Image (cartoon, rainbow, N blue to C red):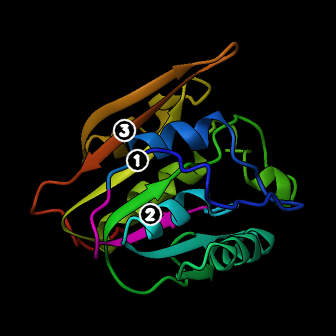
Amino acid sequence: MMYDSALQIEECEHVYPPREDSLLLLECIEVRRGERVLEMGSATGIVSIHCAKAGAKVTAVDVNPYAVSCTRNNAERNALEIETFHSDLFVDVPGKFDVMIINPPYLPVAEKGDIEASWAGGEDGTKVLERFLIEAPAHLEKGGRIYVLMSSLMRASTVSCVLSQYRRERLGERKLFFEQLWAERLTLPSSRAGARSPP
């Protein structure tokens, strides 16, 4: 999906702004009109807003209440309809989705507040991603797909077991001065889609 510079995306205080990782993930996403799309960790809503403009039915979720407001306001600024939820991952999110999108916090540092929560991924940089990948199958429609942003700063071995349940396809990558970013599309075997997440 191409970045649309005509869209009005306002950055908000206490909310992670669009950066190279957000734009790389956006470029790798494909959505079709009418698909139910969930963005987990919407921040300013830049990805959700592009998906809504493409005709998808978008649900945007963030654990940061400032980000929920920011996404909602940016959607209204662009006259697009997006359903927003303040939720810790799937806790307060109903329904199933054809597409899920996540740019998880991936820096290997401990979380200390609302702002850090947008980029602090715990000791291995995978705390949020691991939880998401475990819970996602119960909320993914059969034949659905997940787009995820990954970083070389993550200790990927921590989530290798969880990732092994998915078929993985690398879609794009970007090398920065201090890290490498890449986006993957994950799909599940048909027998796993819609399965209950483990307790």
Q: Would residue 176 appear left or right of 91 to someone viewing this image? A: right
Q: Which mark is residue 126?
A: none
> In whole angstroms, how far apart are the C-alphas of marks 1 and 2?
9 Å
Residue pointed to by mark 1: 1
Q: Residue furthest left?
A: 191
Label 3 secondary element: strand
Task: Give the image location of residue 64, x and y in percent.
Answer: 75, 69
Circles 1, 2 touching at the beta carbon (< 8 Å): yes
Q: Quadrant of residue 159?
A: top left
Going by the numbered disc 1, the residue's amino acid type is: Met
Task: Give the image location of residue 38, x and y in percent.
Answer: 44, 69
> Which of 187/20 is in front?
20
Q: Residue furthest top?
A: 177
Label 1 secondary element: loop
Give, as a single range, the part of the protein colored magenta: 31-41
Task: Give the image location of residue 192, x and y in percent.
Answer: 17, 62
Who comes first in sequence, dot 1 or dot 2? 1
Going by the numbered disc 3, the residue's amino acid type is: Glu
Please report the residue visible at 78 percent of the width from the left and 60 percent of the height from the top.
10
Residue pointed to by mark 3: 184
Q: Quadrant of residue 107?
A: top right
Residue pointed to by mark 2: 51
Task: Give the image location of residue 143, x and y in percent.
Answer: 15, 62
